[in-house]
Amino acid sequence: MLTPRQQQIVSLMVEEDLSDAQIAARLGLSTAAIRCHIFAACARLNVRSRLQLGAWYGRNRDSLPPLPPVPGRGSARPQARLTEAQVSVIRARIAAGENNLTALGEAFGVSRHAIRDIRLGKRWGHVE
């Protein structure tokens, strides 16, 4: 049987036909974490590929326990430290030439890595 997180990821992969990157964005995880969960699910079920994993899910989805709801995006997530408005300000400051990621992170109470990911579009991609 799959863990709830593995089931959630496989469900998004099969039912919504999402890529690893899309699943990662939806769940607030890295694409590497998504791949690890998929690999672990394959190992747990003794299947060799994503295709076989999808086929297993299709055959067994009705007997699986219900999933918890997928968390919202952005500031709707309980662990969010920023709001959409703050992300817009960060993007505007970066566009204006402010390149000190550490200073921006300190100003908004997040790490320089979070600022870098915002700049690269890896986080908060739904905010313009």
Image (cartoon, rainbow, N blue to C red):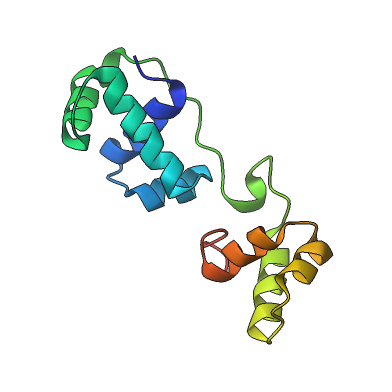
State the image quarter where residue 6 is shown: top left
Answer with left or right where residue 82 lies relative to residue 44. right
The x, y position of residue 85, in whole percent, is: 71, 65
Instruction: Residue at 35%, 27% (x, y): give it.
Output: 40
For the C terminus, give its image quadrant: bottom right
Q: Nearer the viewer, residue 72 or 1?
A: 1
State the image quarter where residue 58 is shown: top left
Answer with left or right where residue 36 lies relative to residue 13. right
The x, y position of residue 75, in whole percent, is: 67, 51
The x, y position of residue 46, in whole percent, is: 22, 19
**How many numbered marks appear?**
0
91 up-or-down from 30: above or below: below
The x, y position of residue 10, in whole percent, is: 33, 32
Instruction: Residue at 45%, 28% (x, y): give it.
Output: 5
The residue most toward the right is 107
Instruction: Residue at 68%, 40% (x, y): give it.
Output: 78
Q: Nearer the viewer, residue 56 or 112?
A: 112
1 up-or-down from 122: above or below: above
Instruction: Residue at 34%, 15% (x, y): give it.
Output: 64
Answer with left or right where residue 98 lies relative to residue 73. right
The residue most toward the bottom is 96
Q: Nearer the viewer, residue 72 or 46?
A: 46
Answer with left or right where residue 47 lies relative to residue 72. left
For the N terminus, give its image quadrant: top left
Q: Nearer the viewer, residue 114 or 18?
A: 114
